[in-house]
Amino acid sequence: MTPKLFALIITLVEVILHMWAHRKNAAAATAGDGHRPDVYYRSPMHVVTRNFCEVCRHERLMGRVGKLQDVRLKQMQNYFRKVTRNIA
């Protein structure tokens, strides 16, 4: 088996496993009773594949946006607490 063919086979297997992991995680998230939040499926080479997978990139960016919004919300809450203390 040539190295190019071997690399192609490994890549195809990784893509299939990566897609399977996304489907398994989505099914676990929508399942009501059997959902275990502590289990998250990943493909073996997830570190490499996540840079090219749009779903992984979207999840990572939405996590960043959520953290930024949490920081802004806390700043606004602190500001309004300070303002209402000065009124009373």
Image: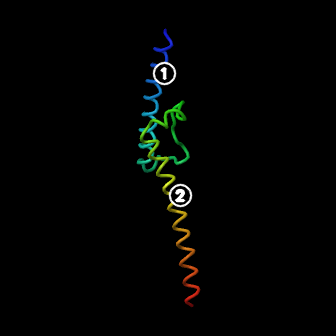
Q: Position of residue 45 (x, y in %)?
A: 53, 30
The residue depicted at 54 percent of the width and 73 percent of the height is: 77
- Looking at the image, which is closer to me, 22 or 32? 22
Q: Residue furthest bottom?
A: 88
Q: Which residue is mark 2?
A: 67
Disc number for residue 37: none
Q: Which residue is mark 1?
A: 10
Type of amino acid at the residue the image marks with label 1: Ile
Secondary structure, mark 2, is helix
The residue depicted at 51 percent of the width and 46 percent of the height is: 36
Q: Is residue 56 above or below residue 83?
A: above
Indicate which disc, 1 or 2, sits on the residue closer to the N terminus. 1
- Looking at the image, which is closer to me, 63 or 75? 75
Which one is in front in this view, the residue at disc 1 or the one at disc 2? 2
Q: Is residue 58 above or below residue 49?
A: below
What is the crowding at mark 2: few (fewer than 14 residues within 10 Å), some, or many (at least 20)?
few
The residue depicted at 49 percent of the width and 10 percent of the height is: 2
The residue depicted at 50 percent of the width and 62 percent of the height is: 69
